[in-house]
Amino acid sequence: MAKISLLLLIIFPFFLRLSSAQSLSANFYSSSCPNVLSVIKTAVNSAVNKDARMGASLLRLHFHDCFVNGCDASVLLDDTSNFTGEKTAGPNSGSLRGFDVIDTIKTQVESSCAGVVSCADIVAVAARDSVVKLGGPSWTVLMGRRDSTTASLSAANNNIPAPTLNLSGLISSFSNKGLTAREMVALSGSHTIGQARCTTFRNRLYNEANINASFATSVKANCPQSGGNNNLSPLDTTSPTSFDNAYFKNLQIQKGLLHSDQQLFNGGSTNSIVNTYSSNSATFFTDFANAMVKMGNLSPLTGTNGQIRKNCRKTN
């Protein structure tokens, strides 16, 4: 009897996590807020039309939310007297964008169906719609997440993969979230859109050997050895506002902007995956979409956990 009780204690939390992920569904709002997907899509398309870079920013917002205690919209919370939020964490401060777009979407959704749709679900759907708008694959976003009532600066600083990581560190960082090395490479393909700040790749430009010389020279023009920390360069110099497989082709010729990018194609275990995605964009698109669904299922708050925030920046 004691053995059975012990076994239940071991496996029950596993089933609890499993059931919470399974309680997400594609048609979660079909009766409670039937037009939510069209509202989000219209707003995302409008935002990306005004600023093509916003597509990458909204995708990154979802990623930085999910990697910190699950996809619970904790990244959107402003600091309070009770906790310091995630916005000033190293990976987010001065670079995370799109909060105003999420605010706009939330306001529009609230006017259709107040208190029904979570900020976490809005972020997840906005990421998908951003990728589609820029020419990438679509996927079915499972919904039913609820919003956290707290945030963690330390978790944001510790859990989001840094651009300085080597391949083993990248694999470990994603493995900690239940994602495979192949899924890590696929998700890294999100760097086919968006830009990075000089401060995140300066060391690679001036101190690393595995970088295309003409590429390094061209980027140095906008990223001096001192100063210009916030100067931007595209992560994919070929087609920075098109979601395609050019990122992987760039890695093959040592044109990865970040140290962590080039680590994917540097004689290691992921070279073959980069080669596959470089030669077959359909395979990349399929793997990316599947990995996004899996990432979107990281530790969601469901049922009576969390809340549906009225304002995404603060708890109710």
Image (tube, rainbow, N blue to C red):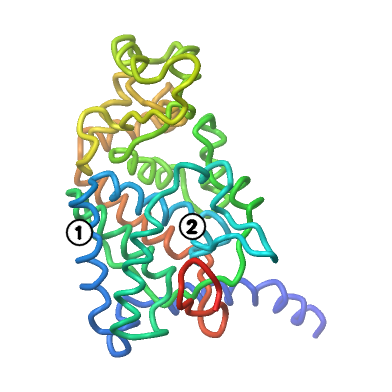
Q: How many marks?
A: 2
Indicate the position of residue 154 as horizontal and vertical percent values: 66, 50
Q: Is residue 119 above or below residue 247?
A: below
| Mark 1 vs 2: CB contact within 8 A | no
Under mark 2, the amino acid is: Asp
Indicate the position of residue 250 as horizontal and vertical percent values: 28, 26
Q: Is residue 268 above or below residue 130?
A: above
Marks 1 and 2, how far apart at CA? 21 Å
What residue is rendered at 33% in x and 41% in y? 189
In the rendered image, which quarter is residue 138 located in? bottom left
Question: Comparing marks 1 and 2, which lies closer to the viewer?
Answer: 1
Position of 155 compared to 171: left or right? right
- Residue, disc 1: 45
Residue sitting at the far right? 2
Given residues 70 and 117, the one toward you in this image is 117
Neighbourhood count class around disc 2 (C-alpha, 10 Å): few under 14, some 14–19, many 20 upward: many
Indicate the position of residue 24 as horizontal and vertical percent values: 41, 76
Position of 94 compared to 293: left or right? right
Position of the C terminus, as image quadrant, is bottom right
Under mark 1, the amino acid is: Asn
Task: Please tell me whether mark 2 sits on a helix, a strand or a loop.
Answer: helix
Q: Is residue 111 above or below residue 119?
A: below
Indicate the position of residue 234 as horizontal and vertical percent values: 31, 31
In the rendered image, which quarter is residue 278 located in? top left
- Residue, disc 2: 65
Neighbourhood count class around disc 1 (C-alpha, 10 Å): few under 14, some 14–19, many 20 upward: many
